[in-house]
Image (cartoon, grey):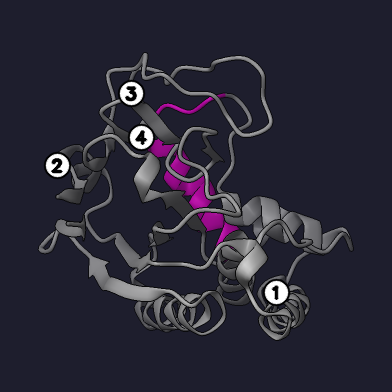
Amino acid sequence: MKQFVTEDSFWELFPNAEIGVVVAHAMKPADQIPEEDAKALARRLNEANAAADQHLTSNTISQNEVVAVWRDAYQKFKTKKGARCSVENLLKRVLKGNPVGSINPSVDAYNIVSLTYALPVGGEDIDAMEGDICLGITDGGDAFRALGEEEDAPTLEGELCYRDDAGAICRCWNWRDGQRTALTDDSSKAFLIIESVDPARSEDLKAAVDTLAELVSEHLGAEIFAKEIITRENPTMVIDE
């Protein structure tokens, strides 16, 4: 059995945070997804790029509320210089007229949700994890190699990160995913997370979770193993048996 565990060190920093989780099992490999589903995801991604404009009221990325709340959040833990929330990076592309393109079906599904709701969304391959996945402040030195990089970049002392028994999975909370547990064309089990630090956006978070579950179920053929909102009062959940 594997679990998602949010640690006390996380809740001490962000007592009002909410994390939406969708656990998808039995996803189809990318080469087995019907053409109509692939086209539907591509269309939804185009629509999401357009929809992201509604969240951008300023041409200065940091002055948009959906980004500012994360800039503030990143001040509360140790980060690598220049690290930014994943949703800021997506919205910055939209602001510059450089729409987010297709990567693979599972990543496209969560990017659709992130752009539509302006919330950070990520995903990991459950079969590639070793033990439970935990979110909390680390002592540092957790093994990590970011996607697209050729050198290791271990975590810093005092950094907030997702990690398992083998090392970090995503650094600086939701900044960079690692190669080891990244979703691929052949991933069958996905741990999909949506994070919110703004209590006023609880309903947006719930809608985003529902949309994500719908996308992976309808277009990736997945079985929704679990769907929950993690809070301080509900800090753990089972993600695999």
Q: Could you tell me residue 7's position as x and y percent?
A: 17, 42
Name which residue type carries label 3: Gly
Q: Residue furthest front?
A: 32
From the image, tell me which residue sits under label 4. 160
Instruction: Determine contact: label 4, label 1, CB under 8 Å.
Output: no
Image quarter (top left, top right, bottom left or bottom right) of the C terminus: bottom left
Per the image, the residue denoted by label 1 is 52
Q: Is residue 84 left or right of residue 233?
A: right
Q: Is residue 10 visible?
A: yes
Q: Residues within 10 Å of mark 3 (few under 14, many from 20)?
A: some
Q: CA distance from mark 2 to mark 3?
A: 14 Å
Q: Residues within 10 Å of mark 1 (few under 14, many from 20)?
A: many
Quadrant of the rendered structure where residue 78 is? top left
For the residues labelled 2 and 4, the Cα–Cα distance comes to 12 Å
- In this orientation, which residue lies closer to the viewer: 3 or 52? 3
Q: Please say whether residue 3 is one of the residues in the magenta stretch.
A: no
